[in-house]
Image (tube, grey):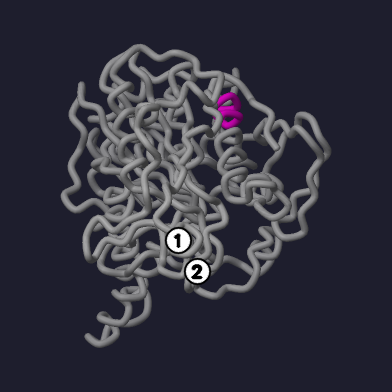
Amino acid sequence: MDARRTMRAAVRVVTALASAAALIATGFVWSLQQQVDTTVVSSTAAIPTPRPTPPGESFTALLVGLDARTDAQGEPLPREVLDALHAGPDEGQLHTDTIILVHVPANAGEQAVAISIPRDSYVPIAGGHGTHKINSAYRRGMQDAEDALRAQGIDGAELDRRAREAGRRTLVATVGQLTGAQVDHFGEIGMAGFVELTEALGGIPVCLNAPVRDSYSGVDLPAGQHLVSGPGALAFVRQRHGLEDGDLDRIARQQAFAAGLAQRVLAPGTITDPVRLQRLVEIATRYVVLDSGWDLRQAISQLRQVSAQALTFHTIPTGRPDLRTPADGIAVQIDRDAVRTFVGSLLESATTPPTVAVAPTSEPSAPSSTPPTTARRVADDDPINVHPADASEVGGTPVPTTSGHPVITADGVPCVD
């Protein structure tokens, strides 16, 4: 294998970790550099014009966790695996339950930021699909493509492959439309890959403020610190039933888990165990999808300069968490202008030396003198926030949004609800 192929292959393993926010684990990246084969699935359509990131240039990656009942090649997962995951019946959802925008800076000393987008965010879906929960963007883009491909006589594995490419493209476009950020790279990992990743790392440290037990996700843990792995780790990050703020509390769980994952990867001995490294390689080849332009040779210098202290996790501003929708049930209300202001401020501040944020008020947001944004339509084909069914409740009055979600840093293991 020549040097270029070796470097391109290694970046694929990065995303297996990055989907759980392990982009900071650069020592691990270097250890895998010579051990990875080029069998990880590559997406040529997720990014419209995929290109490597040159040294000295920052980039923004969209990392998603997919609730797929298949591996990256489209092969069905064994029934015993699905039962262990509490996956439920396969209704073809292909929802993206984890959506994180990660900005990696160009230079040492600059701040890296991870921005979570709640899966129930009610936003316009790219491609003329109307306004729905953002976690359905992948599926909606995929379904449109399936109809067109079947009409051309395409079926089987080729149908699935090309339809999923359309789903990725729709999701990336939807996130870009919502946040105003240019998405340079894309990474995807399925449920089974997430589970095996945590097992290969020997578990991830987490901390709970109170005991939790939820039959839907399968989580059952007392209060305090724990080491979770396998289906237990998946249950920890998937729970939303029984949490006061539902999807928003689940975001805090995911971010706290990512901080614990970073601690685990950086622990002494984690990257020097050849058996563990080989298992991580195997996980990447089965469950990870990367855009075709993500090349370690161009990105590694930036990744090496990101430390745990310089990576913070944020959540986009949200309005009411119980927005009634005509077809999607209860959703999280979103104002695109507020989101774009918030994300733009974070990405701009990423060029300055990092400071540890310890309180919600440290979040960048629109100036306090700016009145709350009223739900409205930005364009005839771009409805924002509120369906007419909710007009009587909103009634033209300001729709409050908040960016008061706690900021989590990757240099500790915070306790969450």
Looking at the image, do the residues carrying marks 2 and 1 touch, with CB atoms under 8 Å apart?
yes
The overriding secondary structure of the stretch rendered in magenta is: helix
Classed neighbour count for the residue bearing mark 1: other residues with Cα under 10 Å, few (<14), some (14–19), many (≥20) = many
Q: Who is closer to the viewer here, 81 or 411?
A: 411
Dot 1 amino acid type: Lys
Circle number at residue 65? none
Region of the chain picked out in magenta, as a range:
259-265
| 250 versus 139 height, above or below | above
Mark 1 sits on what residue? 133
Circle number at residue 328? 2
Residue 131 in sight here: yes
Dot 2 amino acid type: Asp
Q: Residue at x 24, y 58 (%)?
A: 45
Q: Who is closer to the viewer here, 107 or 327?
A: 327
Image quarter where the N terminus lies is top left
Q: Is residue 112 magenta?
A: no
Q: Is residue 121 left or right of residue 143?
A: right
**x and y percent of residue 287 in the render?**
47, 53
Q: Residue 23 lies in what quarter of the image?
A: top left
Q: Residue at x 20, y 21 (%)?
A: 56
Q: Is residue 167 left or right of residue 17?
A: left
Classed neighbour count for the residue bearing mark 2: other residues with Cα under 10 Å, few (<14), some (14–19), many (≥20) = some
Q: Residue at x 69, y 48 (%)?
A: 243
- State which tag comes first along the sequence, 2 or 1: 1
Residue 271 in sight here: no
